[in-house]
Image (cartoon, rainbow, N blue to C red):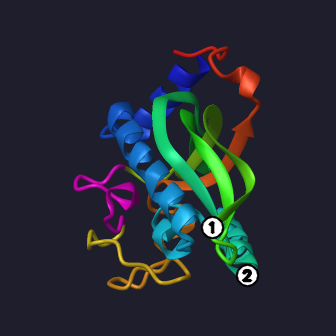
Amino acid sequence: LELQAGLEEIHLHDPQFDPATFVSEVNKAFFVIQQAWVDRQPDLSRRVMADGIWQQHRFQIDQYLGAGKQNVLENLAIQNTYLVGANSDETYDTITVRFFANCADYDIDLNDKNKVVRGSKRVEDWTEDWAFQRSSNAVTKPGGGTLADKCPNCGAPLDLDISGVCSYCKVAVMSGAYDWVLSRIEQLPSWEYGQSTLP
């Protein structure tokens, strides 16, 4: 009921918002961020992550680079994606998305013939909640926004500098003032897999 009420609040000030389209776009964002992580290229994930979480993401990637290691998420697949929370107040719209995914998760030492130094090559299930947020003054753009690789301010192809500023209109679009950005990731205990109350 809370989820439905939250979605209705968002829809009141943004009639073009469509939950099914949102789920499709966050699924794409999921793979963009995982690719950035595995390839150790934080520039790739700048287009979907809010400032704070992206700085943390980049710092963790730098640690892997400095150690000569790489995290591998082999055979990564999403099993299901559910909206599990939605809220709109005077400041923000927030939607929490639960990903049920699986993959093999391990680290390799690039300086030692790609030796596995952590994790396992066995594919296992895991679950994470991702919170996406935007200003409650923002609305869905007809041609798509950040999650569709377009600047939510000027509509140009999304081309950002390290500060999240659009190279065309010079506006800091990853602040959440214009469109959805990923603001938080929470790993859930494995026992919650399949035991959640889902819509």
Amino acid tagged 2: Gly
**Residue placed under numbered mark 1 in the picture:** 114
Q: Which of 175 and 124 is in front in this view?
A: 124
Vertical placement of 34 versus 158: above or below?
above
Q: What stretch of residues is rendered in magenta?
A: 140-152
**Residue placed under numbered mark 2 in the picture:** 66
Q: Nearer the viewer, residue 75 or 42?
A: 75
Look at the numbered disc 1 and give the secondary structure of its residue.
loop
For label 1, the crowd category at 10 Å Cα-Cα, with few meaning under 14, some 14 to 19 and many 20 or more, is: few
131 relative position to 199: left or right? right
**Prevailing SS of the magenta stretch:** loop
For label 2, the crowd category at 10 Å Cα-Cα, with few meaning under 14, some 14 to 19 and many 20 or more, is: few
Say which residue appears at 44% left-offset and 45% top-offset. Answer: 26
Q: Nearer the viewer, residue 104 or 60?
A: 104
Instruction: Give the percent coordinates (x, y) of residue 172.
Output: 50, 77
Instruction: Give the percent coordinates (x, y) of residue 46.
Output: 51, 70
Vertical placement of 171 versus 12: above or below?
below
The answer to which image quadrant residue 125 occupies is top right
Q: How far apart are marks 2 and 1 (CA)?
A: 15 Å
Amino acid tagged 1: Asn
Q: Is residue 70 magenta?
A: no
Residue furthest toward the front? 113
Say which residue appears at 54% left-offset and 35% top-offset. Answer: 101
Vertical placement of 161 versus 75: above or below?
below
Residue 44 visible here: yes
61 relative position to 149: left or right? right
Say which residue appears at 35% left-offset and 40% top-offset. Answer: 24
Vertical placement of 162 versus 9: above or below?
below
The answer to which image quadrant residue 155 occupies is bottom left
